[in-house]
Image: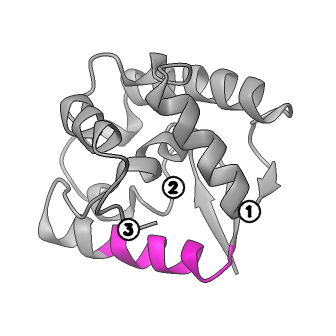
Amino acid sequence: MTVRLRAHHLLCLLTYVGKGYSPAFTANYDKVVERLAGGEDVQIVSGPDDICAPLLDEKEPHCLGESAAGRDQLAARDVGELLGRPIAAGVRFSFETARLAAMRQAFSAGRTRQACQGCEWSDLCSVVAAAGYSGTRL
């Protein structure tokens, strides 16, 4: 199987420590991380992905908003530059150990954080990165 991810979730996964919008969201996120840790590939999608699924039944899911789409564009650009390959809908890859380490190093250095501006989770992600990604689930 393949995990469907929108581009900005490539960044969110780097600092995920089990906190989220709701218990259902967090339980689903944990399952997605388990799949990735088990070696499943990632396929980039445009719009809501496997992480967003529990939020889509809300009256006005933020996953469908312009801010999420804007974060996707910025993350795709920055992660693509880092990895030396385009990050766009349909692209597939895996979270190999070296790739994950490079992504975390760039995140800590601020090279891939433009998509995080204005995000309500940004402060938590900064704390997690500053602590050397201790307690992350991926």
- Can residue 46 be seen by looking at this rendering? no
**Marks 2 and 1, how far apart in space?**
16 Å
The answer to whether 117 is drawn above or below residue 108 in the figure is above
Which amino acid does the dot numbered 1 rest on?
Answer: Ser
Residue 32, horizontal then vertical, whole percent: 46, 72
The stretch in magenta equals 28-40
Residue appearing at x 50%, y 37% in the figure: 8
The mark nearer the N terminus, 2 or 1, is: 2
Residue appearing at x 37%, y 49% in the figure: 15
Residue tagged 3: 137
Q: Quadrant of residue 73?
A: top right
Q: Quadrant of residue 78?
A: top right
Residue farthest to the right, as pictured: 85
**Marks 1 and 3, how far apart in space?**
16 Å
Residue 115, horizontal then vertical, whole percent: 46, 22
Which amino acid does the dot numbered 3 rest on?
Answer: Arg
- Main SS, magenta region, reads helix
The mark nearer the N terminus, 1 or 3, is: 1
Label 2 packing within 10 angstroms: few (<14), some (14-19), many (20+):
some
Tag 3–tag 2 contact (CB < 8 Å): no
For mark 3, give the secondary structure: loop
Residue appearing at x 37%, y 41% in the figure: 63
Q: Which mark is residue 34?
A: none
Residue tagged 1: 94
Q: Nearer the viewer, mark 2 or mark 1?
A: 1
Does 94 lie within the magenta span? no
Residue tagged 2: 49
